[in-house]
Image (cartoon, rainbow, N blue to C red):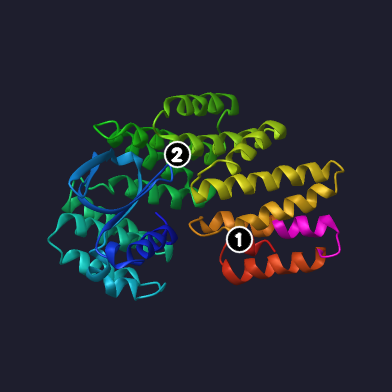
Amino acid sequence: MSMPVRGLLLALCLATPALAQKDTILLHDGTLIEGVRVQAYDIDKILWKKGSSEDTRKADQVAEVTLGKGRDEFSAGFSAGNTVDSYVPFLDAAKSVDDQLLKQYGYRLAAEAAFNAGQWSAAFQILEELKSEIPVTAHAPLLFQMKLEYYLSRGAAGAGDARTTAKAYENEAVVGWSKGFQLDAKLYGIRAELAAGDADAGRIQGQLDQIIRDAVGAAHVAQRARLVKADVLRSTNQTDAAAEIYQGLVEADYLEASVKSGAWLGMGHVLTKRGQAGDSESYKQSLLAFLRVYLDRDGVPAGIVAEALFFGSQAAEKWGGEDSGRMRGYMQFLLRQNYPDSTWAQRL
């Protein structure tokens, strides 16, 4: 979903003349497949050719696809920069394309640009239009995922909409979509329930454990579920058990940026709690964990980064080390400068 990943893959496609007009596929397990030609990509699977050989994966295994031909087709969008209406050139070009692969690629670029610019309604409308144009588009799940990330970012205020959207996602996913999408929808439903604040922690942990067990071949969903489980454990003061999961996540060979940042955020909260118990060195380690979220912020939801900066400034103050005051001021500056409209900036 994130612009930084798309930019990375585009850069790889442009790196050498041999790859300039070839396609690149990033799988959820971190595998990068370069120098191929995508033949088909829909809600069921992706099919590509390299030389005379063909290969395929289920659609739920695919994290990102960059089409080499898109460099020229959507050049106006790539040149538009990060402005509130930077999605418009992508959308205009996508509407004029006949090739379905390029069309859905352009629509996705437009939706991502709108979403990252805070133009939520525009992003949703773009993906709804894409689904109307291409009912079996590979990006049908993205419409639900974007809506859910937006509603969940609003906390309890968005919990009702999140629940409704998660149920709609699950209802559609069970009718022929890959297992990874079905489990993803269930996980969003759990997150929506947690956001509402009326969930039973024990029951939720059992549901998360079931998703983790069922996520054979969908490790990225299992990792997301482990992060949610760690957050639930932390919220019920089972900090050691939560810390063990967070540590396992940050040490994983490959992890989605949002999951890794969520694990560092959680670890920061665990270390803060240990500091409150009298271990002052934990405040310094907490500060470093929160700072890690900011330093590795590419592809990470703004709300996670803003939260890390807010609590990082508090950890710096409580640490009381030689650079404590400077780090507290620095993190507050970053929060006000980069996320001025966040609830975290308003709490300073």
Q: Is residue 72 left or right of residue 336?
A: left
Q: Nearer the viewer, residue 318 or 291?
A: 291
Is 164 left, or right, of 229 in this rendering?
A: left
Residue on which disc 1 sits: 295
Q: In which quarter of the image is the C terminus?
A: bottom right
Query: Which disc, if any, is residue 220?
Result: 2
Q: Which amino acid is tagged 1?
A: Leu
Where residue 243 appears, as percent x and y from the top left, is 68, 37
Query: Cα distance, mark 2 to mark 1?
Result: 22 Å
The image quadrant of residue 318 is: bottom right
> Amino acid under label 2?
His
> Percent position (x, y) of residue 29?
43, 42
Residue at 33% x, 31% y is: 179
Q: Give the range drawn in magenta.
A: 312-323
Q: Residues within 10 Å of mark 1 (few under 14, many from 20)?
A: few
Please tell me which residue is depicted at 43% across the width and 43% down the height of the picture. Answer: 162
> In the drawing, does residue 308 fall left or right of residue 148?
right
